[in-house]
Amino acid sequence: MLKQVEKVNYRIVRPLGVLSVNGNISTELNLISYNNYKPKLDLRKWETKGDTKLLQRGLTLTTEEARELKKALDEYLEHVDELLEAKESKA
């Protein structure tokens, strides 16, 4: 038996940036409140159909998770050239 999915209400509290656009699909970073709960950082694809934006797959992070992700990204970006060179030399 198929389970009916409840409708999710969301409100974009603050748009933070558009990372990419490919046709009618954009990857966006927003601060979003789902079902009137505390806003969370939301990175996801959105599909534009006419005047409507439809949620696609994404990732929602608490503030603490976002801080940990930032640390990991900072570390990666600091050493990205070394990491890519090491991978290429092994290939």
Image (spheres, rainbow, N blue to C red):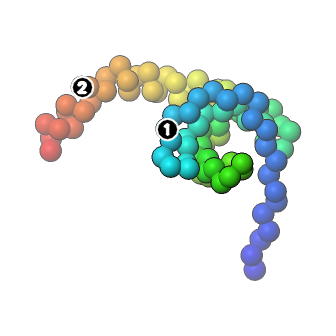
Q: Position of residue 33 (x, y in %)?
A: 78, 37
Q: Residue at x 15, y 44 (%)?
A: 91
| The N terminus - image quarter | bottom right
User: What mark, if any, has residue 20 been given in the picture?
Assistant: 1
> Of discs 2 and 1, which sits in the foreground?
1
Which element carries disc 2, helix, strand or loop? helix
Separation of marks 2 and 1 at Cα, in angstroms: 26 Å
Residue 82 vs residue 36: left or right? left
- Residue 79: x and y in percent read 31, 23
Mark closest to the chain's N terminus, 2 or 1:
1
Residue at the extreme front of the image, as rendered: 50
Q: Which dot marks residue 57?
A: none
| Whole-percent x, y for residue 46 in the image | 61, 47
Type of amino acid under label 1:
Ser
Labels 2 & 1 near each other (Cβ < 8 A): no
User: Alpha-carbon neighbours of circle 2 within 10 Å: few (<14), some, or many (≥20)?
Assistant: few
Instruction: Give the side of residue 79 with respect to residue 58, left or right.
Output: left
Is residue 91 rendered to the left or right of residue 48? Answer: left
Q: Secondary structure at mark 1?
A: strand
Quarter of the image where one finds residue 41: top right
Outermost residue toward the right in this view: 36
Q: Nearer the viewer, residue 4 or 75?
A: 4
Q: Is residue 1 above or below residue 40?
A: below
- The mark tally for this picture is 2
Point out residue 76 in the picture as x, y percentages from the top left corner.
Answer: 38, 26
In the picture of the structure, the residue carrying the numbered disc 2 is 82
* Residue appearing at x 51%, y 34% in the figure: 19
Q: Residue at x 61, y 51 (%)?
A: 47
Q: Residue drawn at (67%, 29%), measured in percent from left and top?
A: 15
What is the quadrant of residue 32 in the picture? top right
Q: Is residue 55 visible?
A: no
